[in-house]
Image: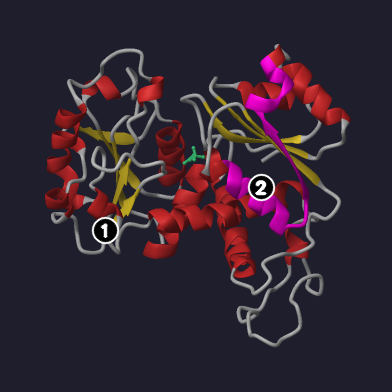
């Protein structure tokens, strides 16, 4: 990852697999009675969020704390950004306080890469414009691999607003890198004009592919990024592309339903479908903490070799506390 995590496209398949393998260890840490290890003690991680977030911000901050890093939170609404301070001056100000990593979300594509050029700290992209959301891609791949065993030959349908979706871009990159076949399902107005660089198929009707999918990955309609009406109405969108209860009944019994959140229940997914056993949306959130622990560990930690073996059964009541005594 060259000290930063900016896009999935910059990662080799081996690097992706390394994150997923280290995530297995972090899942075990998170299952402990005290889910905390001293791996990043003395390190400082700052979260710099210029756009709203619930899952990504909280899971990065939780991940850093579980690895014993110090965490600085930055909220645009209460910062000197409101007084006109630039991104560069903000980064230099925070860096002067002594930091090791910046987790950045911004509405403009390329801002994390720009910060990486200015900063000596590791930069982790937590979502930039329509461009990339690499940790979302990694947690999606981890969740799918955990359920299905492997992504080789798995058919993933990514459904909805592909055009405005950084989640779709990172998903296409990570799923295809791991051997999955991706079909984008959307009306032409919600697809980017040039699909040639992507090794994907396209379908314009969810009904044409629903019975053939191993994973039905639904995207949120990103109304905040749309500058024009790209679908006639949300009702018509739901009629053609929503995972309604009737459509969900046509999925293979073992097919997974995924969504990055936040969901528009009743638009891209029926509320009842989101709560079915094959919907792994809360697994995605839980795995997000472990994946982000793995990313922070690989960027800031003492190295993969120091990870050590962590016994599976570490949560027995009455045993010694399991922090600070292990290899991590
Ligand atoms: N999936 C995702 O990025 O969610 P948040 O916007 O809540 O972080």
Main SS, magenta residues: helix
Q: Is residue 266 left or right of residue 320?
A: left
Above or below residue 310? Residue 328 is: above
**For the point 46% across and 43% down, which residue is it?**
174
Which residues fall within the magenta stretch? 57-82
Q: Which residue is mark 1?
A: 255
Q: How many marks?
A: 2
**Nearer to me, 83 or 243:** 83
Residue drawn 71% across and 86% down? 319
Q: Residue furthest bottom?
A: 318
- Of the numbered discs 1 and 2, the one sitting upstream in the chain is 2
Provide residue 157's location: percent of width, then percent of height. 28, 43
Magenta run includes residue 81: yes
Instruction: Where is residue 261? Give x, y as percent.
Output: 41, 43
Q: Is residue 160 left or right of residue 69?
A: left
Where is residue 135? Give x, y as percent.
55, 43
Which label is found at residue 61? Answer: 2
Residue 17 versus residue 169 in the image, above or below: below
Q: Secondary structure at mark 1?
A: loop
The residue that appears at 77% across and 66% down in the rendered structure is 328
Q: Is residue 71 magenta?
A: yes
What secondary structure is found at the residue carrying circle 2? helix
Q: Nearer the viewer, residue 174 or 287?
A: 287
Q: Quadrant of residue 84?
A: top right
User: Where's residue 208, x and y in %?
Assistant: 13, 41
Instruction: Name the residue rendered at 87%, 36% in the picture.
Output: 98
């Amino acid at each position: 990852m060259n000290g930063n995590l900016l896009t999935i496209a910059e990662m080799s398949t081996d690097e992706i697999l390394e994150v997923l393998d280290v995530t297995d260890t972090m899942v075990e840490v998170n299952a402990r009675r005290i889910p905390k290890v001293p791996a990043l003690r003395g390190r400082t991680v700052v979260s710099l969020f210029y756009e709203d977030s619930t899952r990504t911000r909280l899971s990065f901050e939780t991940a850093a704390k579980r690895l014993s890093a110090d965490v600085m939170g930055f909220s645009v609404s209460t910062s000197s950004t409101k007084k006109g301070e630039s991104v560069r001056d903000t980064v230099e100000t925070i860096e002067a306080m002594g930091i090791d990593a910046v987790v950045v979300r911004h509405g403009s594509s390329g801002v994390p890469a720009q910060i990486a050029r200015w900063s000596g700290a590791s930069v982790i992209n937590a979502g930039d414009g329509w461009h990339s959301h690499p940790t979302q891609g990694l947690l999606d791949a981890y969740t799918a691999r955990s359920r299905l065993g492997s992504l080789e030959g798995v058919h993933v349908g990514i459904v909805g607003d592909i055009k405005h979706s950084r989640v779709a871009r990172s998903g296409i990159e990570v799923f295809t890198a791991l051997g999955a076949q991706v079909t984008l399902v959307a009306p032409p107005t919600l697809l980017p004009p040039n699909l040639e660089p992507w090794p994907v198929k396209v379908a314009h009707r969810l009904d044409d592919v629903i019975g053939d999918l191993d994973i039905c990955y639904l995207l949120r309609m990103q109304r905040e990024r749309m500058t024009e009406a790209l679908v006639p109405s949300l009702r018509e969108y739901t009629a053609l592309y929503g995972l309604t209860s009737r459509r969900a009944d046509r999925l293979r019994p073992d097919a997974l339903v995924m969504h990055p959140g936040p969901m528009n229940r009743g638009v891209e997914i029926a509320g009842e479908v989101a709560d079915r056993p094959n919907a792994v949306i809360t697994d995605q959130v839980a795995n997000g903490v472990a994946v982000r622990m793995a990313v922070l560990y690989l960027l800031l930690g003492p190295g993969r070799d120091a990870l050590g073996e962590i016994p599976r059964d570490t949560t027995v009541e009455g045993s010694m506390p399991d922090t600070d005594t292990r290899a991590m």
